[in-house]
Image (cartoon, helix red, strand yellow):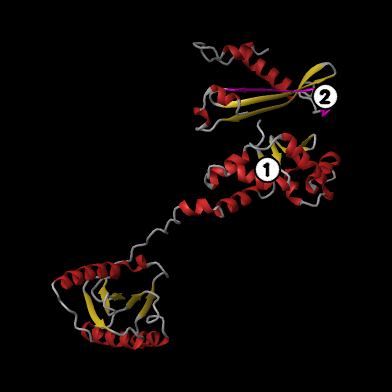
Amino acid sequence: MAEPLSRLTKKGEPFIWEDSQETAFRELKGHLANTETLGYFDRNTKTVLITDASPVGLGAVLVQEQNGERHVICYVSKSLTTTERKYSQTEREVLGHVTPRALTTREIEEASAVDLDLIQLRKCIRSKQWHKLENKHYLPLRDELCIVGQLVLRGTRILIPETLRGMVIGVAHEGHPGIVCMKRRLRTKVWWPGIDRDAERFCKTCHACQLVSQPQAPEPTKPTELPTGPWQHVSADLISLPSGDYLFVVVDYFSRYFEVDTMRSTTTERIIKSLRKIFLTHGLPLSITTDNGPQFIADSFADFLAEQGIEHRRVTPLWPQANGKVERQNKSLLKRIRIAQTGRWKLTII
């Protein structure tokens, strides 16, 4: 029956699909779908599991002896991941239909026998009375579930009773893989409602993982649109000096020209006084950008800008890069101040 098809797989044989191959294919397909070929699982019948592995995948056949003849109950196959394809042939052979490491099938079966959710689920699978099921998480999967002894399977994955889920999560996290790798480990062998959520929570609360994890990547920066002329949009900031004094810096976005005022007090009134002096020299800008310091969020500062018709733009809290223009200028100023201090230059503080 399969000879016309197997002939096409021989080395050097041209792949030509003719009537004989089409007939053999349809015949083979019919046999595989025939109830006389695929039987129903009987828990009281001798069962044989046949597994095999190739460089690219795993395969298995579940066979039972029924009425003196062998009947195939189920075919299973799985493609290997890129990492698994690098295993030796021996390692690939032992990779198929395994239970979670550090747990035996008997342990899972004993815990499943007394798990209330699984007891009710087994009754519903046998009786098909799904309206009596209290845990509705299983309803969308009812056509995928089957029973082997006290075990409940979703396809080839074992449903883990609640008492063993913590142990299974711990085994899957062995070696401290990331969330994605941990989920992949679990999905190949086990399942329960909320398994992905539990895996994420376990990874995020692992103390060792938190110590070595990288900080969350920052949001992509958005460049500030360049003004069309000088002194339209300015940025202001305060620099703290080692002496305890402060520099108040106002930078023009267009020309990068900056004004600096030295001060001992950084109250809102002192900031407003300095801005009035700078605005009298250069005129009123359309907007001013500041951080969220207490001097810049005070009501009196907002009233001053409103009186002058100036828009107040505040940057993201705890994110100085958002006000990069003045931050870069501050860096240059501090460098010059350090050079000046080495030459015993002193600031005249007002």
Q: Residues within 10 Å of mark 1 (few under 14, many from 20)?
A: some
The kind of secondary structure element at disc 2 is loop
| 17 left or right, relative to 237 | right
The kind of secondary structure element at disc 1 is strand
* Place of residue 155 in the rendered image (x, y in percent of width and height, measured from the top left): 70, 36
Observer-nearest of 138 and 244: 244
Residue at screen point 63% across, 12% down:
20
Which residues make up the magenta segment? Answer: 42-53
Report the amino acid beneath label 1: Trp
Q: CA distance from mark 1 to mark 2?
A: 27 Å
Question: Is residue 236 something one can see in this rendering?
Answer: no
Report the amino acid beneath label 2: Thr
Observer-nearest of 281 and 64: 64
Residue contact between numbered discs 1 and 2, judged by CB atoms under 8 Å: no
Report the residue marked by disc 2: 45
In the rendered image, the vertical position of residue 94 relative to residue 187, given as above or below: above
